Image (cartoon, rainbow, N blue to C red):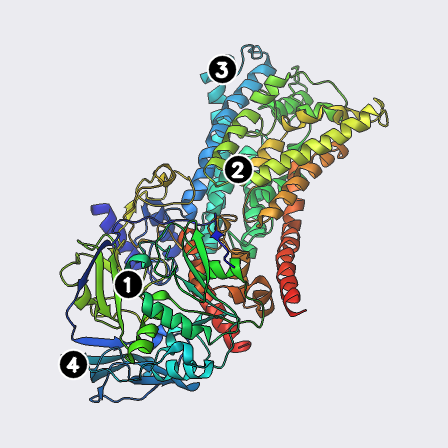
Amino acid sequence: MSQDIRIKKGLDVKLVGEADKTTATIPLGSVYAVKPDDFHKITPKLLVKVGEEVQAGEALFYNKANEALLFPSPVSGEVIEIVRGAKRKVLEIKILADKKQQFKDFGKKDASALSGEEVKAHLLAAGCWPFIKQRPYDVVANPEGQPKAIFISAYASAPLAADLDYTLQGKEAELQAAVTALTKLTEGKIHVSVSKNGNSPLAGLNGVSLHKVSGPHPSGNVSTQIGKIDPINKGEVVWVVTPQDLVIIGELLLTGKFNAKRTVALTGSKFSNPSYVEVLIGATIADIVTTNLDETNERIISGNVLSGTQVNKNGFLGFYDNQITAIPEGDDYEFFGWNKPVFNKISNSRALTFSWLTPNKKFDLNTNTNGEHRAFVLTGAYEQVFPLDIYPMQILKACLYKDLDEMEALGMYEVAPEDFALTEFICVSKQPHQQIIREGLDLMLEEIG
Amino acid sequence: MGLKQNLHNLKEKYKGTKMAPAFNAIHTFLYLPNETTHNGTHIKAADDLKRTMNIVIMSLVPCLLFGMFNAGYQHHLALGDIQSVSSGFFSGEFWSIDNFMVGFWKIIPLVIVSYGVGLLVEFIFAVIKGHEVEEGYLVTGMLVPLIVPIDTPLWMLSVAVVFGVVIGKEVFGGTGMNILNPALTIRAFLFFAYPTWMSGDKVWVKGAVERDQLIAAGENLDAISGETVLGSLAKTQPYNYDVSEMFFGFIPGSIGETSTLLILLGGLFLIFTKIGSWRIMLSAVIGALVMGFLFNSVVDADIITSGSKFYGLMSLEFWKHLLVGGFAFGVVYMATDPVTASQTNKGKWIYGFLIGFISIAIRVFNPAYPEGVMLAILLMNVFAPTIDHYVVQGNVKRRQKRLKAKTA
């Protein structure tokens, strides 16, 4: 049974710097890093020491709460540094890559012949489990859990997002192998959503329930699709995997190797030549952007402009990211910027802002907040860009005053921080919605679990 | 870039001190700040609260200017200096410099006092509590002079503004936290504390009070009066204005409330810019029409006869209620205040409808002061969270039902 999803509420944030459909292969960089912070709420217990040699796919650390949950090294090489922050928290595990990569052999598997437990054990052992995330709470899936369904969104609607139809071309075999393995992990369905007008390599997969998605962002957000297809109720769990991670899982099954390679989009106005590159997870940003980047007062983001993480040139590509965005910093004053007519910024209103006149124009936005932080004042605007059947302002306020019952009643199990990226973008009061939701989810995770 | 750099240096200097909010308020008035995003979305839409409030102020300017002309026009008309308008909206009798100057010198002090006193209170609270000066008062400060009678003494206005800003807003935590609309709180304070200055037939025309005092002192002068349409109707007296005069606003009333035409244009502007809620405005108009129609029906059915003290207002054709008094102004500019209105879209329909409905009811049944929109909005301000609660419960129940259907 296939069910098409069409949403009307939302906003396509159109920016300059869309990636050209050419992919460059970048030579193997020198230093790679895994950042435990990419895995929310995971407390790392290190398995390696500085100076040790690791192979690609070999575990660097495990989760304190669950020893079976291993986190792999994307490359083979020598662990050269473990960066720690306050209270000796592990921030980065840096690995100097070997010139010739050594892969740890996990053995080829025929997914269709494996049982659910075998699939689980295999993914855990090979470090592929962190690719599976769960709702509620938007964290790495608990391997002991039983999801009612698994969702894969192969339609990226976020600003300047990598075109998955392009980056996953020719990966059908890996995708099919991974999906076959996933079917063993749930009694429910595997829901795959593709763009209605696209030509997705995932459209031809067997053993899935396919959905065609159309409408503005956040139609590609997996929460939007879950909400339309099979909303999460209290006590239920769904798992979520991104298609680019499916490829890595598929390759593991087909070849026995953990190959952290993925096609990453370099986007945004600060790239002289926005395009795709093939790199490994955890690569140094400087190695990826090389000479492509205009380095004058730029903001580099691992991920998209709405929910990515700020990194500097010496930082590293995030574990889940398939996009690097570079936009201008907006750290300058603007004379009478609050009352003069605005033509070069996006707005959801028409308050002397004229982006509604040019719906197809691509904007070059900077990181200025365009105003100061205020209490919630305006109402009714968030709903215009928020397609879930949830009252956004009410749930945000419930998170702020930490009322667990109300958060639960208003639908906290169904949301992830990224769902509040658009409301945060248009927020007149410049409130940090995603942070509020993240803290709310963390509180629920601690108190309810 | 001398000014920009100097202000930046001053900001750095004041950072963390008590006076920082006061300085920042002036600084951010001149310059959009240089703040950048950190976590969450790296880009932000163009709108901030200042821009939003500025749009509302812009939509009020025509009402303010019209109020100045009308103040002079009513004054000269009452003195018999000029004839009443004869040729539509752009009549020369109305749009004269003479009229404008009378109103200008009367109204500008009201605006200055309203902003001066109100912003002073805001600055003091911002400095004491260490938060930024919020923009809410920019609109309130403009609304207040528009909803008071022309002769309101400045000291009275100051007292009311202090009361309204402190009790109506700051004690709750400032803009965004208040329960009652601050501008209406100010007006309600004036209304209950100084009723003789806020109602009757002597307050709506400049100089009428003064003239009355002179007559009382024994001078041989003609009294000037200007009764509002509602005031006449409440006394079951005829009123002398035709529909176009009421629609254009050539009638006595609070300074900015008379011109339904300009208020309508302002309302459309607010709806177009997506700042004002069309749901509230539309449903309030519907609510008023329904109530007006009910009263007309009661009169038509001869339940209320011309002997009744309610007859005058009840028999007013239901659609004319929209043209007279402060209804239009209240609905467009006060009921739509996002902080004190219902916050859910469904709730806005209910909230607006009840404001319209109750406004007309109070109008008809309140003999002392034949206008109900202020009290109706304040009443519904108090009930707005309750309305929202039940609307949100609908969503919660739907979620629970889904869970039950699943587990059953």
Q: Secondary structure at mark 4?
A: loop
Q: B324 or B190: nearer the eye?
A: B324
Parent chain of label 3: B
Q: Earlier in the sequence, mark 4 or mark 1?
A: 4
Upstream in the sequence, badge 3 or badge 2?
3
Q: Amino acid at mark 4?
A: Asp
The answer to whether A380 appears left or right of A168 in the picture is right
Amino acid type for the residue under numbered disc 1: Gly
Q: Chain of mark 4?
A: A
Image location (x, y in percent) of residue A424: 42, 56
Q: Subunit of mark 2?
A: B
Element marked by disc 1: loop
Residue B175 at what x, y percent from top left?
Answer: 51, 51
Q: Residue at x 56, y 52 (%)?
A: B178
Neighbourhood count class around disc 2 (C-alpha, 10 Å): few under 14, some 14–19, many 20 upward: many
Which residue has dot 1 on it? A170
Given residues B393 and A292, the one toward you in this image is A292
Q: In 3D space, how far apart are the residues under numbered discs 1 and 3 (Cα atoms)?
A: 72 Å
| Residue on which disc 4 sits | A98
The image shows residue B238, relative to residue B1, as above or below, that is above
- Residue at 46% over, 31% down: B61
Q: Which mark is residue A125?
A: none
